[in-house]
Image (spheres, coloured by chain):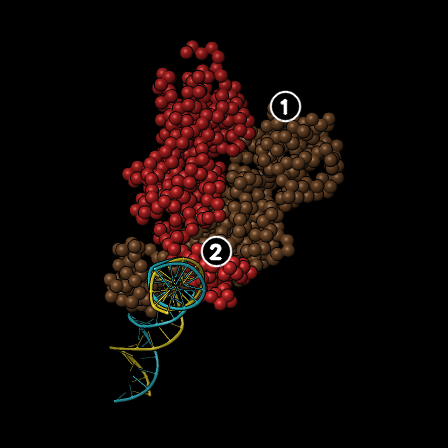
Chain colours: A red, B brown, C yellow, D cyan
DNA sequence: CACATAGCTGCACACGTTAACAACGAACTT
DNA sequence: AAGTTCGTTGTTAACGTGTGCAGCTATGTG
């Protein structure tokens, strides 16, 4: 069927061992025979059987990039940046296998022999068992985006809390004091970190927290819309709303403009994530950039070094988030406070 | 190191063949021994070595999903929908390897032994050589999104032209006659198909085509912005602009509002693709839904059937695009024409 | 001249799995 | 009782590649 090193060996009147060595540039082989065999291989369109290689070398050439889910809750931009970051780093040295953890009934296919290393882009605590599974089997592992408890891993996460803190502080600096929050999906760590940043900023600047200014969302566009609708029904409306991601911010803006109010004229809105489109909506959205692509790239580099050195470093690294100021926040003049 | 069927065989006092058969549910094996061996395997945390399986069974369990590039020109939504569509279909039966064709210096790693089948999400004619390469090696292949010449393949493509036709016809029905177009990246087939649909609609309805209403873009947000800026400088501005994708439509809207004009009050804008966010911008964007997820899902199903039946069907299937009417087009009353 | 050495090549086995074929006892047939 | 069949298990080779060890030849060394 397809041509093997044995076929080449016959034609070149050498043993298959010699062919194998020649193609792998072994110093044992004479330069001329090496060259001769290589040309023969090229002319026969030989490609090695990687399954056989994998079997004997105990390397799969596969890298896994696993998301908590690919069905819902993973935004397009998130997936895109993650894949891009990893893809940029691994060249054509590895195959990149992209799957959702929830696609697997059993993890049988996930093992040392099938993966040289694994990146988990963790979005939810539901994938804890997967992370433990991989960790137990001593597959080189890097967990991105979500802090992991209990199990020691290399952990790269965005500093959501300080990002949210800076964002809300910025609102306060612009004179806002009635600041509402629309939160993300409940069991996501990111939800908690962003809420904590919000609370931290409010407390630090002695701005009162109000229960009716705290809304639940689930990171979907629609949930931002409905939460905002409820906020608009309040007697004393907030002057600014911190939406825990940009998608919900868009939903909120939609709700506000449908009520014949304007952003930021009547109500200021800020988001989180800095989606690609966020600079191009009207008004351009003030938000926090979450460096998913950076995290993925760094994570991939770490993983490659684990694989190469056969040694795992296990630490938690926070990657700085960044305030992106655009046009969706109004500066309130004549405030009473400092 | 890791446990193999031979280890299990020793412990169970049978030959490794029996173990292999038991785990593969061969009818040759006695029910009781089968059960006994399975429990033993489970208790030892046995997972098969897929490299060895692949070698002897001549199946890799790998499916490839290749994009023209992952670096630029591929939108996040596009990547997302494509992966989602394929991922939904293949369950945990296969690994899904996602790469950009331009990531490879040589295609050595792409061969029959490493891939049971390949989906190419083709966005540019630059990947023609890749498609030919795969086709020559008789790897089960499905090409999505872009029509392929010269080489016979299974080809699933959105009917961009009829979508653009319907969209522009809709503009004309709303009373528009000064309709500009901002085109996509030049060597992309989609650019041509959408332009053809535009021209077809204009001609069919006897609306004059004007050279100064034809702008070049490259599918990026920025290019929509700059192209629109130029359109606004014209003496007789268009009343409607057909942007060849939603990203450019956003850029165009940005340019319009910055000139203190309104959409759709002063100028109507339509896009193409129906990105997830397009319904949530202000005004909500009238556009054409390109069923990338459907195409991917269908393509994956076709591919699986090729693999199963070991028989390739080669035909071109157009997948219907769909007009999505929202709020970015103004109805012009008192037009002179029918 | 015997012997060590360097440079190159081949033999034989290993990796973990599947499968064609043989083998064996029990039950059934004639 | 001998032959046949069935159900179950084992023997052995195969998939394509890499590698430890042995072997060969030519060259250099004492």
Q: Which residue does the numbered mark 2 point to in the structure image? A: B115
Q: Position of residue C20 (x, y in %)?
A: 40, 73
Q: Position of residue A333 (x, y in %)?
A: 48, 12
Instruction: Name the disc covering residue B128, or none.
Output: none
Q: Using a 10 Å C-alpha cutoff, classify the residue at mark 1 as few (fewer than 14 neighbours), some (14 to 19) or many (20 or more).
A: few
Answer yes or no: is residue A283 visible: yes
The quadrant in which the C terminus of chain B is found is top right
Residue that appears at 49% across and 64% down? A8
Instruction: Using residue A125 as the reference point, say whether residue B250 is left or right of it.
Output: right
Answer yes or no: is residue B154 visible: no
From this view, report whether residue A28 is shown above or below residue A259. Answer: below
Q: Quadrant of residue A193?
A: top left
From this view, report whether residue A180 is shown above or below residue B270. Answer: above
Q: Using a 10 Å C-alpha cutoff, classify the residue at mark 2 as few (fewer than 14 neighbours), some (14 to 19) or many (20 or more).
A: many
Q: How many numbered tags mark residues here? A: 2
Q: Position of residue B49 (x, y in %)?
A: 36, 57
Residue that appears at 50% across and 49% down? B65
Q: Which of A136/B306 is in front?
A: A136
The quadrant in which the N terminus of chain B is found is bottom left
Q: Position of residue B104 (x, y in %)?
A: 52, 48
Q: Earlier in the sequence, mark 2 or mark 1?
A: 2
Of badges 2 and 1, the one in the foreground is 2
Instruction: Using residue B141 as the reference point, say whether residue A144 is left or right of it.
Output: left
**Which chain is home to disc 1?**
B
Residue that appears at 43% across and 18% down? A172
Secondary structure beneath dot 1 equals loop
Q: Which residue does the numbered mark 1 point to in the structure image? A: B259
Q: CA distance from mark 2 to mark 1?
A: 53 Å
Label 2 in the same subunit as label 1: yes
Secondary structure beneath dot 2 equals loop
From this view, report whether residue B111 is shown above or below residue B219. Answer: below
**Which chain is home to disc 2?**
B
């Amino acid at each position: 069927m397809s041509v093997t090193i044995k076929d080449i060996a016959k034609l070149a009147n050498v043993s298959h061992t010699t062919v194998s060595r020649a193609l792998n540039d072994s110093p044992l082989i004479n330069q001329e025979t090496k060259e001769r065999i290589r040309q023969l291989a090229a002319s026969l369109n030989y490609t090695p059987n990687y399954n056989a290689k994998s079997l004997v070398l105990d390397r799969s050439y596969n890298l896994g990039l696993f998301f908590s889910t690919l069905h819902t809750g993973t935004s397009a931009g998130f997936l895109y940046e993650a894949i891009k970051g990893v893809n940029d780093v691994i060249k054509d040295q590895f195959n990149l296998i992209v799957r959702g953890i929830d696609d697997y009934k059993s993890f049988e296919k996930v093992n040392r022999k099938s993966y040289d290393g694994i990146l988990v882009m963790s979005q939810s605590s539901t994938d804890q068992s997967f992370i433990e599974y991989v960790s137990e089997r001593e597959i080189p592992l890097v967990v991105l985006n979500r802090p992991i408890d209990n199990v020691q891993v290399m952990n790269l996460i965005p500093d959501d809390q300080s990002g949210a803190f800076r964002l809300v502080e910025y609102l306060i600096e612009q004179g806002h004091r009635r600041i509402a929050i629309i939160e993300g999906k409940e069991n996501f760590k990111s939800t908690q970190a962003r809420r904590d940043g919000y609370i931290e900023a409010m407390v630090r600047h002695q701005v009162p927290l109000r229960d009716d200014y705290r809304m639940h969302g689930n990171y979907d566009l629609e949930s931002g819309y409905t939460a905002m609708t409820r906020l608009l029904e309040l007697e004393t409306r907030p002057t600014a709303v911190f939406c825990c991601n940009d998608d919900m911010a868009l939903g909120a803006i939609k709700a506000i403009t449908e009520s014949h109010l304007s952003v930021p004229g009547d109500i200021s809105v800020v988001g989180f994530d800095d989606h690609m489109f966020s600079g191009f909506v009207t008004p351009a959205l003030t938000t926090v950039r979450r460096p998913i692509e950076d995290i993925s790239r760094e994570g991939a580099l770490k993983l490659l070094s684990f694989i190469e050195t056969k040694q795992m470093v296990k630490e938690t690294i926070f990657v700085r988030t960044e305030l992106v100021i655009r046009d969706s926040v109004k500066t309130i003049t004549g405030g009473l406070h400092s």
